[in-house]
Amino acid sequence: METFLLTVYVLMWPVIVAGVLWTVCRGFFKDWAESRKAGRSII
Amino acid sequence: MGRGAPLEACTVDYAELQALLDVTEGNCVPNDAELFQLSGWTVVLLLILVYGGTLLVSAYIGKKKENADGYMTAGNKVGFGISAASMTATWIWASSMYASATAGYTYGISGPIHYGLWGALMILFIYPFGKRIRAVAPKAHTLAEVMHARHGRSSQLMLAGSNIVGSVISLTSNFIAGGALVALLSPFSFGQGVLAVAVGVLLYTLWSGFRASVLTDFAQVVAMLGAVVVIIPVVFFAAGGPDMFIQGADNLTPEQSNFFSSEAFLNQGAPYIAAVLAYAIGNQTIAQRLFAVREDLIKKTFVTATIGYGATVIGIGLLGVMALYLGMAPAGGDVNNLIPQMASTFLGPVLLCLFFVMILGALSSTADSDLSALSSIMMADVYGKNVAKKANPKTMLLVGRITMIVATAAALIFASQQMDILDLLVFVGALWGALVFPVIASFYWGKVTNKAFTTSVIVALAVFIPVRFSWFPMDGVTGILFDILSVAGIGIVLGLMAFGFFGLKPAKIIGSIAALASAPFVIGFLHDYTVLTGSLVAYAVSTIICYLMSVRSKQDFDFALIKQRIGDYDPQDDDGTHPDEDLDSSAVPTRK
């Protein structure tokens, strides 16, 4: 049980990081699409 | 980008940075030792890929005539994706990864939590204050500029000065980390690595400033976080997977295998909790992003960055825990070699290249933010508010670019010559701690005066120094007196953290409970820990003096004045036009 919990403890962080990466990328491409639609630079 | 503070936390970072310096003094693994290295051509190609790529991104958004305000804050309307990526990338630097792994190796399974979690909360706890700051100063460029509008020059320069020293130290540390990485994993020398990183970062940041910094941060965060997602599981299973925890259990002490280790909390966690607000207030890199992001996206951006930073740094820190389970001794006796050592032991050449890019992305994204922070302080706080009678946007841009070149040259010299500027961390950290209450109170309480602000910070610093360096014995009544001040410091720190989220009444209750609950454990005991005592006393003294001097003042500052005193410097719009409303002279700030 302890080994299982430690394995989860190690592998949960890359999963959370992947979630953040997905969120940030989705936000970026949404910003990108909106800025192109408005004919201005993304930043 | 965890930064220095007046606490034991500061000594953690200090030790990490000092250890990075030691790499240049021959304490690292010799180039022909057991660490697998990348070939010279591979490293050159990776450097061209990283810095050539970021230069292309920067050129893509570059304009022949950059806007001075855009150079500092990108027009105050950056979207969620870029701003969240930028805040995450800026706060993650090479030293935070190394320090987290060291915490894991030293304190066991809870070590990375006590490094990464509290470092992440530095981003989280500043956002409620950030919303208030944006409300009173929507067009500001730096926090010190707002202090100028609120109080005047002495408060402004005190904050700006601490920001400058902090950013130069951070810039130097990132160059050192780059040199150390190149020296460890390639045939090139430390000096060649430092030079490559410094030139690479300067090239892509120089023309467009903050705009280039935040957009390239997105590319760097994709590389960094993408690498973390791949590298941690690969190393974990290559090192033996779950069996590692069974076979290596004997390598841990009972304290190291305890998730609720009091040793890890007292030595790593507690000092960092006290540093949360000091770090956040002391960094122009955070303030710049608070002013740049669209106002309605502040919370979403900072919560995302908190999770991104925390998960990345804790995850990488677990490489140190794995090294502990494996019974691995740090190469050359230097714990800073643990991460490169784990990478070169368990990753193949392709993933080692990915690891190289991850560390390069971490240090470059923080270094470019430091350059942008330094240039905006020199542009807005020095030139805009203290030199020019009416700021000229063209001159302002020139000031910003010259600042970047000078700062890079200075950090290059500090890094290459191994000048011991890290001692400054102790003082700048103490200054940040002393600034926390006066800065925060200045945004909410109209009675805080410039005199109260300045006096409280100077006196707090004057008390901090003899306590921190044990200039007098802490026996008897003296020790008890400073312990009582430390108790007040604990109440103030936790009260301020609560105030941002819950308001004044709950903050007073939480602060009082924290002080009363800690008193039996602190009084008669804490004064032996001079570093932690010094920082808590700095908080307490600055708060008590600032409060006592302000509560009797008849001033009731009108916060609407700040909005009138701070505006855009550059009437030229982003597309090069000159809209009439921006040409109204009242919108162009002049020297007061």
Image (spheres, grey):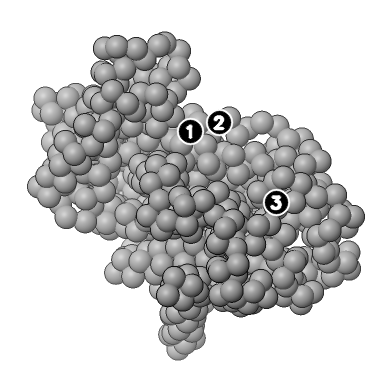
Q: In the image, is B387 to the left or to the right of B147? A: right
What is the number of the mark on residue B137? none
Sort mark 2 into few (<14), some (14-19) or many (20+) by Cα contacts within 10 Å. Answer: some
Q: Residues within 10 Å of mark 3 (few under 14, many from 20)?
A: many
Q: Which residue is label 1 attached to?
A: B428
Which tag, 1 or 3, sits closer to the chain's start?
3
Are the residues flagged by discs 1 and 2 in contact, CB closer than 8 Å? yes
Q: Is residue B67 above or below residue A40?
A: above
Task: Say which quadrant the C terminus of chain B sits in.
Answer: top left
Q: Is residue B277 above or below residue B389?
A: below
Residue B426 shown left or right of residue B51 in the figure: left
Q: Residue at x 44, y 70 (%)?
A: A2
Query: Is the C-beta separation of discs 3 and 2 under 8 Å?
Result: no
Residue type pointed to by label 2: Leu
Where is residue B263 drawn, in percent x and y? 43, 44
Of tags 1 and 3, the one toward the viewer is 3
Image quadrant assignment for residue B277: top left
